[in-house]
Image: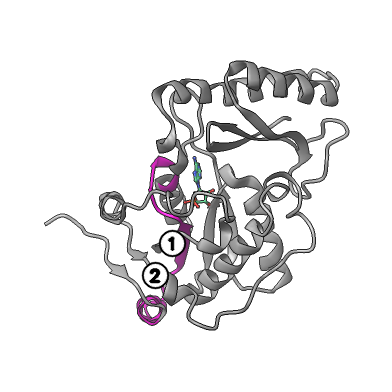
């Protein structure tokens, strides 16, 4: 019979399974997701397996990280398909809590960072990273894995998580896994399902324009004018708006004055209502 990934929905049930694994001396990895799983998420499971004996994937669309005018209600939810995908790569456990299990009546705690969260995705999404930090803190404490894996697709999120996990002495190693792309270079994302065929063909210009900018930056062209020209290129390609297109330093997220080994190029741009993000190293 083919393998089916078991599902737990409560913190008690999650802890019971992880406790049993610990008794057996096994190393545990957690891969937090919001579901609508694609090959990017599945690559994190593979990555996690190289660092642990058992892999837990959490699936939870976290209301606290969505703003009032964002796509919380519309966000794709497809648990059965997700469990089938996880089963196909023999994921050991899925943790699928309800909103009430995560945030029971009376919940009042918020994790707030005092830097790194007001730039890039934080600039236009106030409270977004507090919501991410709060849910990830809970997930880490609920599961207490040895390692937790996050994708470089959400590079700022990865740096924010590394920061608060270190600041709060949470005893979990945070690992970043490579960004996975479709054949035409577009970063795979749960939000790509929102794109019409025409929008999908516009979306592929993000990686092309980023690559072109990174190449020119590496050759020594002025970063300011590259950012201005790149934003114009995105609009000319068919994007409706550019939230940001910026060269920043990888671990601090501070603005890059010149190209260093740490320089990355970050973008968020909208086609219609769909907001896409991407980032690449420059060096
Ligand atoms: P999400 O379900 O969008 O919250 O993403 C869950 C995790 O999967 C996060 O750590 C993301 O960075 C990661 N992820 C999403 N898309 C990709 C991708 N294309 N490549 C690598 N990791 C990804």
The tag on residue 227 is none
Q: What residue is at 61 percent from the left and 79 percent from the top?
A: 108
Asked if residue 48 is positioned above or below residue 21 in the image, the reply reads above
For disc 2, the marked residue is: 97
Helix, strand or loop at disc 2?
loop
Q: What residue is at 70 percent from the left and 73 percent from the top?
A: 168
**Is the residue marked by circle 1 packed among few (<14), some (14-19), or many (20+) residues within 10 Å?**
some
Query: Tags 1 and 2 in contact by the CB under 8 Å rule?
Result: yes
Query: Residue 97, percent across and down?
Result: 39, 70
Asked if residue 50 lies left or right of residue 226, the reply is: left
First along the sequence among labels 1 and 2: 1
Q: What residue is at 25 percent from the left and 52 percent from the top?
A: 84
Helix, strand or loop at disc 1?
loop
Indicate if the residue with disc 1 has its beta carbon within 8 Å of ligand 1.
no
Write down the quadrant of residue 163 in the picture.
Answer: bottom right
Asked if residue 125 is positioned above or below residue 21 in the image, the reply reads above
Write down the quadrant of residue 133 in the picture.
Answer: bottom right
The residue furthest left is 1
In terms of depth relative to the viewer, which is nearer, 46 or 109?
109
Colouring method of the image: one colour
Q: Which residues are magenta?
A: 12-41
Query: Residue 248, percent across and down?
Result: 77, 39
Q: Count the marks: how many?
A: 2
Asked if residue 176 is positioned above or below residue 101 in the image, the reply reads above
For disc 1, the marked residue is: 60
């Amino acid at each position: 019979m083919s393998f089916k990934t078991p599902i737990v929905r409560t913190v008690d049930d999650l802890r019971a399974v992880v406790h049993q694994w610990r008794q057996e001396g096994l190393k545990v990895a957690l891969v937090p997701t919001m579901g609508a799983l694609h090959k990017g998420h599945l690559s994190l499971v593979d990555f996690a397996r190289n660092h642990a004996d058992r892999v837990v994937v959490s699936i939870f669309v976290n209301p606290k990280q969505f703003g009032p005018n964002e796509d919380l209600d519309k966000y794709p939810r497809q648990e059965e398909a997700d469990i089938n995908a996880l089963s196909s790569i023999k994921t050991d456990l899925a943790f699928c809590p309800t909103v009430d299990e995560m945030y029971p009546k009376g919940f009042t705690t918020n994790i707030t960072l005092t830097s790194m969260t007001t730039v890039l995705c934080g600039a236009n999404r106030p409270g977004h990273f507090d919501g991410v930090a709060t849910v990830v803190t809970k997930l880490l404490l609920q599961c207490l894995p040895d390692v937790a894996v996050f994708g470089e697709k959400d590079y700022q999120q990865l740096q924010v998580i590394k920061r608060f996990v270190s600041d709060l002495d949470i005893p979990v190693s945070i690992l970043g896994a490579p960004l996975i792309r479709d054949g035409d270079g577009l970063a795979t994302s749960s939000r790509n399902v929102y794109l019409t065929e025409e929008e999908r063909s516009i979306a592929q210009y993000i990686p092309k324009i980023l690559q072109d900018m990174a190449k020119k930056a590496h050759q020594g062209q002025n970063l300011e004018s590259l950012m201005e020209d790149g934003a114009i290129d995105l609009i000319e390609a068919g994007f409706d708006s550019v939230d940001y297109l910026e060269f920043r330093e990888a671990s601090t997220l501070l603005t890059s004055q010149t190209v260093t080994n740490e320089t990355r190029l970050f973008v968020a741009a909208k086609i219609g209502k769909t907001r896409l993000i991407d980032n690449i190293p420059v060096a």
